[in-house]
Amino acid sequence: MDSLPLPIRQRQLDDVAEALPARAGQLTRLFLARSAHTLTRTEIGVLSATSQRAERITDLAAAEGVTQPAITLLVNRLQARGWLLRRPDPSDRRAVRVEATAAGRAAFHAVRAEYRAFFHEEMASLADEEVQTLARAVEIIDKLVHHLEAGVDRP
C-alpha cells in the first residue's frame, strides 16, 4: 500500500479527529430523540458501567465527564427507580461503590437492544461493501480506543 503525501495525511487526520466525536454525538442524539425510553446518555453510560462491575462515584463522574455532585444526583435518581445499589467500598470505608441491580441491568440491556435495532434497520439498506467498511472502521476505532485507554501515544 502506497503512503499518502504528508500534507494529505495530516489533513485527513485532522478531518477524522474532528468528525468522529461529532458523528458519534449525532448518532446518539438521533437515537435518543426517536427512542421509546426516557434515559439520558449519561444515565445509559452509568448503567452500562455499573452493569459490568461496581464503580466508585468519583470514577463514574470522571468517566461521564460530569461533576461529582451531578453524578450523585443521577445515581440517586437511578437508585430511586430500583436500578442501582450502593455498597461500602471494601478498600476505603469512606467511599461507596455503585452497582446495577438486576432491574438496572435489564433496563440497560433493553436500551442496548433498542439501539441495535434502530441502527440495524438503517444499515440494512447499505451495500455489502459499505457494511464491511463500517465493520472494519469499528475494529480500527476499537484499536484506537484501546491505545488511548492504555496511554500509548500511537496505535
Image: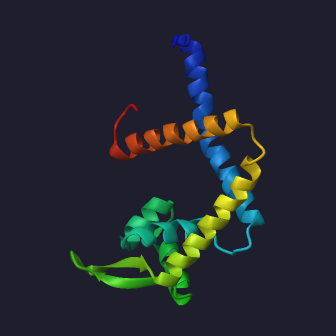
Residue 124 place in picture, x, y as percent:
74, 48
User: Which corner quadrant of the image does residue 53 belong to?
Assistant: bottom left
Residue 91 place in picture, x, y as percent:
21, 75
56 with respect to 81 (left or right): left
Residue 133 place in picture, x, y as percent:
62, 34
Query: Front-most of 44 and 68?
Result: 44
- Name above or below for residue 74 compared with residue 113: below
- Name above or below for residue 52 compared with residue 80: above
- Name above or below for residue 52 compared with residue 98: above
70 with respect to 123 (left or right): left
Q: Residue furthest front?
A: 128
Residue 16 shows up from this direction = yes
Residue 74 shows up from this direction = no
Image point (38%, 40%), residue name:
147
Image point (68%, 33%), residue name:
129
Query: Front-most of 18 and 34?
Result: 34
Query: Front-most of 122 and 79?
Result: 122
Residue 45 place in picture, x, y as percent:
53, 65
Image point (45%, 44%), residue name:
145
Q: Residue furthest left?
A: 91
Q: Quadrant of the C terminus?
A: top left
- Name above or below for residue 103 compared with residue 35: below
Query: Front-most of 131 and 68?
Result: 131
Image point (51%, 13%), residue name:
1
